[in-house]
Image: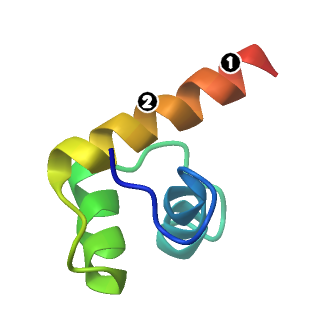
Amino acid sequence: MYCSEDKQGMYILRAMENVSPNGDAYTAAEALFKVCQRNDRRLSYPAFRENLAFCFTRACSA
């Protein structure tokens, strides 16, 4: 599992804010991955998907 210096998945939330600052309801996972990978080239797509699933799990359980 990939976990940057941030808490798991926080980089995805920041990327979502950068991609859709007005709160767009839909952003493709591939677009988010490209934004995240620009910030950290070590990020792999499977690790990104795992962290994305973690974010959704946390959001749904909150």
Q: Which disc is residue 60 wearing? A: 1
16 on left or right of 1: right
Q: What's the distance in space between the residues labelled 2 and 1, CA to CA?
A: 10 Å
* Picture layout, residue 45 above or below residue 51: below
* Picture layout, residue 28 above or below residue 49: below
Picture quarter with the C terminus = top right
Residue at the top extreme, as displayed: 61
Q: Pinpoint residue 39: horizontal percent, then vertical percent.
A: 36, 84
Q: In the image, what residue occupies the spot 17% across and 51% down? A: 45
24 or 6, nearer to the observer: 6
> Where is mark 2, residue-wise?
53
Label 2 Cα crowd, 10 Å radius (few <14 / some 14-19 / many 20+): few
Q: In the image, what residue occupies the spot 60% across and 58% down? A: 10
Q: Amino acid at mark 1?
A: Cys
Q: Pinpoint residue 38: horizontal percent, then vertical percent.
A: 27, 83
User: At numbered mark 1, what does the secondary structure look like: helix, strand or loop?
Assistant: helix
Residue at the right extreme, as displayed: 62
Q: Pinpoint residue 59: horizontal percent, then vertical percent.
A: 69, 28
Picture quarter with the N terminus = top left
User: At numbered mark 2, what does the secondary structure look like: helix, strand or loop?
Assistant: helix
Q: Amino acid at mark 2?
A: Ala
Q: In the image, what residue occupies the spot 65% across and 56% down? A: 23
Q: In the image, what residue occupies the spot 55% across and 72% down? A: 5
* Picture layout, residue 30 above or below residue 43: above
Q: Pinpoint residue 41: horizontal percent, then vertical percent.
A: 21, 80
Q: Residue 51 lies in what quarter of the image? A: top left
For marks 2 and 1 on the same chain, the one whose residue lies earlier in the sequence? 2
19 on left or right of 14: left
Question: How was the colour assigned to the protein in this rendering?
Answer: rainbow
Q: Which disc is residue 50 wearing? A: none
27 or 37, nearer to the observer: 37
